[in-house]
Each structure stands twice: as C-alpha cells, then as structure tokens.
Image: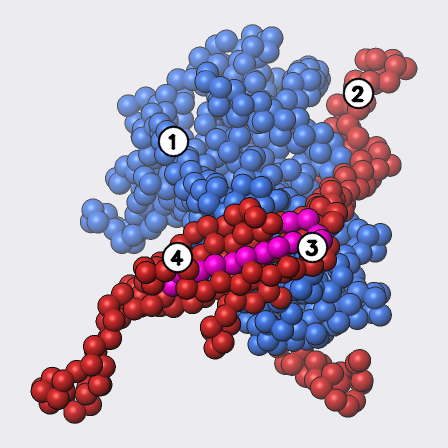
C-alpha cells in the first residue's frame, strides 16, 4: 500500500467513525456526513432565496450599494439583516459541505471508473461557487469588497489578456461608475445560475439523483443558520475608499483563504496552483484508472423486456430498446459498460434470476460476467454446508465484515441487492435456519440504492418480492456501519436466540 | 432613505418587481426539488420505526446480560441524548461557520505603512517615423485612402523606472498591446512604503533611443499612513503626476 492509499484509507476511517457517531445522534437517514451533497444543494437554495430578497432592497450604485446593505443590516436587522446573514452563512456552509463531500468521495474511492463523470464535472462547480461567492462580496462595497475586487483584478491581469490592466479601474475614488454595480449584479445573478446548471450536470448521469436532504436535516440546517444569523449577524467593514488602503480585514476564509497567498506569493504562483490544482483534480479519475470487472451482460433469450433492471439500476446504465431477436416482446435491455458499476443490482431485480433450477439452466436475463448466478448459487450451497448453527449471513464487499462469526457462514456480494429474494427462499428451503442480510446503513450504500431496493424487495414494496411462503421470523436484516462490529455480533446472537424459540418448520411446496 | 410612497426608493419600486418575479422564481425552485422537502414519507418513517425497535431489542438484551451495569448504548434509543447530540452537532457547524467567516483577522498593511501604485498606460513612439506621401503616391491611392502621411502602426516598447529615496523600486519595460503592437504600453505595479516624506523620481523612455529618458518627474512627497499614492501619467498634458 503506497503512502497516498494509506492517507486515503486513514481519511476513510475518519469519515466512517464520524458516520458511526452521527448515526447514533441523527439516525442513518439524517446523518449529515452521508448527506453532504444534498446539504450543499440545500444551502444553495437558501442562498438563492435570501439573495432574491436582498436584491429587492439593493441599490446598484457606488454610494447606494453600501448604504442599502447597511440599511438592511442595521435598520432592518430583524428581517433584512437576518436574510443577509443567512445569505452569507449558507454560502459559507456550501463551501464547507462541498469540500467535505469532495474529500469523502475521494477517500471512499468513489471518483474513478464509471464515477469519473461526477468527479470531473464537480471541478467547474468549485470554480463557479467561488465566482458566485466572491462576486457577492463585491456588492457590499466595503473595505473587504475593495480588497477582494482589486486582488481579483490584479490576479486576472497577470494573464495579460486585456489591453489595459483591469485593476486600474479601481485606482482612486471616482474611478468607478454606478453602472459598474449593475454589471456586478448581473455577474452575481448569472454566476449562481451557471453554478446551478453545472450542479445539475454534476448529478444528471445518475438515476433519481438526490438533491434534497431529508426534511429533518433541512430543518435543522435552516435553524442552525438562522440561530447563527441572530447570534453573530454578518456585518460590513467601513465603506470602501479607493484612496485609502484597508489595513486589518476580517476575511471570510471559506472564500478568501487564497488572497493572503496571492499577496505573499504573487499572481503567477496562484494561477499555477489554481490551474494546476484544477487540472490535477480533473484527471484524478485516471491516475491510475480503476481496474474494473466486466460489465453486466444481457442474455437475450432469457430477457423478456420487463424493465425491472432498467428501473432499479442506480446509474442509468441500462436502456430499453426495441427487440432485435424476433422474440415476441416489445423491448430488450441493453447495458452501457461505460456506466455500469458492476454492482449486480440488476441481477437481483431480474425475475429470471432464480436458483430453483438445474445447474445447466442457471442462466438469467442479466448477469455479472465475473460473478454469474451459477457462482452465486455455489457460494450459497457452500455457505449452507458451513453454517454449523444454520445461519447464513449475506453481506457486501464494502460493508460489514460478515465472515468468521462462529456458527455462521457468509455470502459476500458486490452489493446485498445483487442477491435476488428467491435466493433467500432457496436458502431456507435448503435447510438454513435463518438468513441475516447485513448491508450498509440507509443512505450509506456504495451503489446508492442497493440497501433501499433490498429493503423494499424483502418488505414487499418492490418487485421481485420475497415469496409469502418464506417465514419472516427466519429472516433478519441489519443495516449498519462497517465499524459496528459489536452490533453485528449482538444481532447474530439475538437472531440465534430467536431462532431457538422458533421451531423448525417445513416450507410448503407451492 | 426608504420612503414608502415617493421617490426612487419608494417601496412599490421594489415591491412590484418582487411581486412579478418572485412567484416565477419560487415556483422554479419549488419544482426543481424543494417541494420534496414537504412531502410526508410514510415508508421512510415506518422503516425508521422498525429499525429503532430492532435497536431497542438489542439494547434490552445487552442490558439484561450486563445486569445493572450500564453498557454502551445507542443514543437513538434515548430521546434526550439524541436531541442533545444533534444540537451539539449543529452548534459545531455554527461555530465553524461563525469563526472562519471572519477570523482570524488578516493584516494587509502594517501600521505606519502606505502603498504606491504605479499605474500608467501610454503609447510608445512609432517604430518607423511617419513619411509624407508624394503627389504621385497620393494619386495612386483610392480617393478615400489618400492620407497625407504614411505611418507604420507598430509602437516602441516603453521603459519605466521608479526611484524612491535613491533606491530603484521598479525598473521595467512594457510591450505595446495588440497583435500588431499598435496599442498602448501599460504598467500596473504596487509597492509598500513607510509613511512619511520621500523623494520620488519616475522616469520613462517611450521610444527615443537618442535619450536616456523622454519624460521625468522628481518630487518630494509626504505620504500619509494607509494612503494609496498613485504615480500616473497625464496623457493630455504629457506629464507624470503623483496623487
């Protein structure tokens, strides 16, 4: 393991520990660490709505800009002031959530392979967020705005793309006209619109993208931002005066952390860092490229075009196209290997994925090339033989360590949702006393909807259902963090005790 | 400043655009996702309840095994701790935002310091001098192109020096802007100096190779703390200035 991988694993463990802690406080679904992307989205909406309200009162002129913001902050603190603070803190919160989201996805190695698209399109999101935030700071036209405006223009001037330095427009009092603020307002409206567009592009490739946090988390975030706005309202510095150089500045470090670097190192170094950093971030998914197994494969003569795989694929890798083989069905499934994560959720969704067949007939409509249905049944058969206490645990490659628990045997799949419910029926029919499905917590699935689909299939909300004949007392689920080892062992012990009380019962042949 | 009925700042001046555009905007924001925040999700609630019941059962068994000894418990089963832990998380979130949005304070300029901004944009002399066209040359041109003087477009490089108290603070040259090098040469530099009296000299050569400098201004300047002293060039008067 090289140094970088060690760092990545270390950060991953930090996130896992934080998730485990937050699971206890918030429950898995509201866990803010698993909702960083949606929290960032939500804070964008808070900033957008408060921004519209502020714009109503904002005056686009050299003198009016500062005085209108001061009016809101001081005279109308109970509404305009709170809106201003909410606007400020939500945009700061967005930077925080975005930074953590980026770090988390990197640490969990969810930026390579088919996930390159979201990572790659995330880079312009960073730039646009900074342009949006910084252009907003200019509008206040206080000393901080003066510092940021001049610094930004000097940074741009280094590129030498303008005939005359743009920073010379901020030379002395009287250099600026009111129309400059009209331009700024346009900039501060269009940059966030582009940002929203880019955020849409960022999530467009996955099916059912999650952009809203759970209601409780949204309410909590709003309350926290509002409380902060009342406790520590956002205020302006003194009015900008281009004849006087600002001395001490209370920088917003979320947005302006690189301005002191600019002062210390100069624009060239900062451009090198910004461009170099962006290019490096953009090409990271290919440094090195992820080694991936072969994509899911459709066996046409077993596919009846039922669309279940198409509906369940969390990455939109499956499309339904007109039938090409002359069989009397309207459509057939086609897998796009460039978008397939090899999670096997489609296999779990396919109604032909059943183990109740002779080995030679174990072919399903859609299957993983490297772990086909035959191999899955072999794993299950071996587990049934090895489970001395009769409990088989179904786990996933990215979740809890389900192997080595006394008296049980484990079946590990890329995702628990890879296993069709008929396999659970099969295990109970073949003599397993109980089946424990141990997956990741809600919203913690590496393949987005694996946990949800499995829950829905077992609980009869999603096709293919678990047959009614399977005694539910013999099935247990545990959706928990990979670090929740004690909980897993306690659940197994609890399950064993319950099974003792539940006498073996023949499953009727239906 | 905000009169309710009169003047540019009357409330209606803001209220009317708000009333027109806000519903459009809010409906857009609503339909792209905010509406989902207000949907009751019965399934999720049910699943959460089942999960909590499962944890409660585990916890009861643990406590039974451990007797009266308190064991590590899932806070989710204890409502007061559950809310306190959430509140603590939000407090941490607020603290991070509240602190780093304004702290630590950054000192851009030291006490008793000022800034000199050397800023000028000046076209250098033409690289080739203008030549008067002969009558024959003029006649050969189309009527609308008959300019008496034939001038090359390319301008000379402009050289500039700034000296403060006998020390060269800046010495450099700027090429003319434009693909044909026919624009102005621009300088934009800034320097920090201590406030007080200084002797400043700014010199420029805009393309006359026979002279060391074509323009110069030497002057004692009293610079105040935090002053932004501009060293520039009046194009119309063809002279430097300190401001």
**Residue highlighted by disc 1:** A287
Q: Which residues are magenta?
A: B193-206
Alpha carbons under labels 1 and 3: distance apart = 57 Å
Q: Residue A45 at x, y = what percent?
A: 63, 59
Alpha carbons under labels 1 and 2: distance apart = 42 Å
Chain A rendered in what hue? blue
Q: Residue A451 at x, y = what percent?
A: 55, 36
**Residue highlighted by disc 2:** B72
Q: Nearer the viewer, residue B41 or B36?
A: B36
**Residue highlighted by disc 4:** B212
- Relative height, residue B68 to residue A15 (above, below): above
Q: Nearer the viewer, residue B55 or B153?
A: B153
Q: Are marks 1 and 3 in contact (CB under 8 Å)?
A: no
Instruction: For mark 2, name the chain.
Output: B
Q: Residue A179 at x, y = what percent?
A: 57, 76
Label 1 in the same subunit as label 3: no
Which is more foreground, mark 2 or mark 3?
Answer: 3
Label 2 in the same subunit as label 4: yes
Q: In what quadrant of the picture does the C terminus of chain B appear?
A: bottom right
Task: Indicate whether residue B203 is drawn in magenta.
Answer: yes
Q: Is residue B204 left or right of residue B190?
A: left
């Amino acid at each position: 393991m090289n140094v970088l991988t060690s760092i990545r694993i270390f950060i991953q463990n930090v996130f896992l520990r934080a998730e485990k802690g937050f699971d206890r406080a918030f429950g898995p679904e509201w866990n803010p660490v698993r909702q960083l992307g949606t929290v960032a989205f939500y804070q964008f909406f808070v900033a957008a709505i408060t921004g519209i309200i502020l714009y109503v009162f904002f005056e686009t002129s050299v003198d009016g800009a500062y005085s209108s913001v001061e009016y809101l902050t001081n005279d109308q603190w109970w509404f305009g002031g709170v809106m201003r603070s909410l606007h400020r803190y939500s945009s700061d919160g967005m930077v925080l959530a975005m930074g953590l989201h980026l770090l988390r996805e990197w640490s969990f190695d969810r930026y390579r392979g088919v996930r390159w698209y979201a990572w790659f399109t995330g880079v312009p999101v960073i730039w646009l967020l900074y342009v949006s935030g910084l252009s907003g700071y200019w509008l206040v036209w206080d000393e901080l705005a003066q510092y940021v405006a001049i610094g930004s223009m000097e940074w741009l001037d280094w590129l030498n793309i303008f005939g005359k330095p743009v920073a010379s427009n901020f030379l002395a009092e009287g250099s600026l006209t009111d129309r400059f603020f009209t331009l700024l307002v346009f900039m501060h409206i269009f940059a966030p619109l582009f940002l929203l567009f880019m955020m849409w592009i960022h999530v467009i490739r996955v099916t059912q993208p999650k952009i809203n946090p759970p209601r409780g988390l949204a309410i909590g975030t709003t309350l926290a931002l509002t409380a902060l706005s009342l406790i520590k309202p956002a205020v302006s510095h003194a009015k900008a005066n281009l004849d006087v150089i600002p001395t001490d500045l209370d920088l917003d470090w979320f947005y302006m952390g690189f301005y002191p670097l600019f002062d210390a190192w100069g624009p060239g170094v900062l451009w090198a860092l910004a461009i170099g950093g962006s290019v490096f971030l953009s090409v990271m998914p290919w440094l090195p490229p992820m080694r991936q197994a072969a994509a899911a494969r459709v066996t046409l003569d077993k596919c009846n075009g039922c669309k279940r795989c198409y509906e369940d694929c969390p990455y939109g890798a499956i499309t339904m196209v007109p039938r090409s083989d002359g069989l009397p069905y309207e459509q057939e499934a086609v897998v796009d290997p460039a978008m397939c994560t090899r999670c096997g959720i489609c296999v779990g969704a396919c109604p032909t994925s059943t183990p109740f067949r002779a080995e030679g007939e174990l072919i399903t409509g859609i299957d993983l090339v490297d772990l086909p249905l035959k191999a899955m049944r072999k794993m299950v058969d071996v587990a049934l033989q090895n489970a001395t206490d009769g409990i088989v645990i179904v786990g996933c490659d990215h979740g809890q360590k389900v192997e080595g628990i006394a008296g049980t045997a484990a079946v590990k799949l890329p995702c628990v949702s890879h296993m069709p419910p008929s396999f659970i029926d099969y295990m109970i029919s073949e003599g397993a006393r109980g089946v424990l499905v141990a997956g990741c917590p809600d919203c913690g699935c590496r393949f987005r909807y694996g946990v949800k689909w499995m829950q829905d299939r077992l609980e009869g909300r999603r096709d293919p259902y678990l047959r009614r004949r399977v005694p539910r007392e013999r099935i247990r689920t545990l959706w928990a963090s990979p670090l929740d080892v004690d909980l897993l062992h306690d659940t197994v012990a609890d399950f064993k005790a319950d099974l003792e009380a539940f006498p073996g019962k023949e499953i009727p042949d239906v | 400043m905000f009169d309710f009925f009169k003047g540019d700042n009357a409330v209606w001046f803001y209220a009317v655009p708000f009333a027109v555009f806000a519903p459009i905007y809010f409906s857009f924001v609503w339909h792209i996702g905010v509406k989902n925040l207000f949907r009751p999700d019965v399934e999720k609630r049910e699943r959460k309840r089942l999960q909590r019941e499962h944890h409660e059962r585990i916890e009861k068994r643990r406590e039974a095994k451990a007797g009266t000894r308190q064991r590590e418990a899932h806070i989710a089963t204890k409502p007061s701790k559950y809310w306190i832990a959430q509140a603590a998380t939000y407090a941490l979130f607020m603290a991070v935002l509240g602190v780093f949005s304004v702290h630590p304070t950054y000192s851009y300029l030291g006490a008793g310091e000022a800034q000199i901004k050397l800023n000028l944009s000046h076209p250098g002399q033409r690289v080739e001098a203008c030549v008067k066209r002969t009558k024959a040359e003029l006649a050969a041109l189309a009527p609308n192109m008959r300019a008496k003087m034939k001038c090359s477009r390319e301008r000379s490089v402009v050289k500039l020096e700034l000296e403060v108290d006998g020390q060269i603070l800046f010495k450099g040259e700027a090429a003319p802007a434009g693909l044909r090098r026919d624009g102005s040469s621009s300088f934009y530099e800034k320097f920090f100096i201590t406030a007080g009296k200084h002797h400043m000299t700014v010199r420029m050569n805009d393309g006359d190779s026979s002279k060391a400098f074509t323009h110069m201004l030497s002057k004692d300047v009293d610079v105040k703390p935090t002053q932004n002293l501009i060293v520039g060039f009046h194009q119309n008067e063809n002279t430097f200035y300190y401001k």
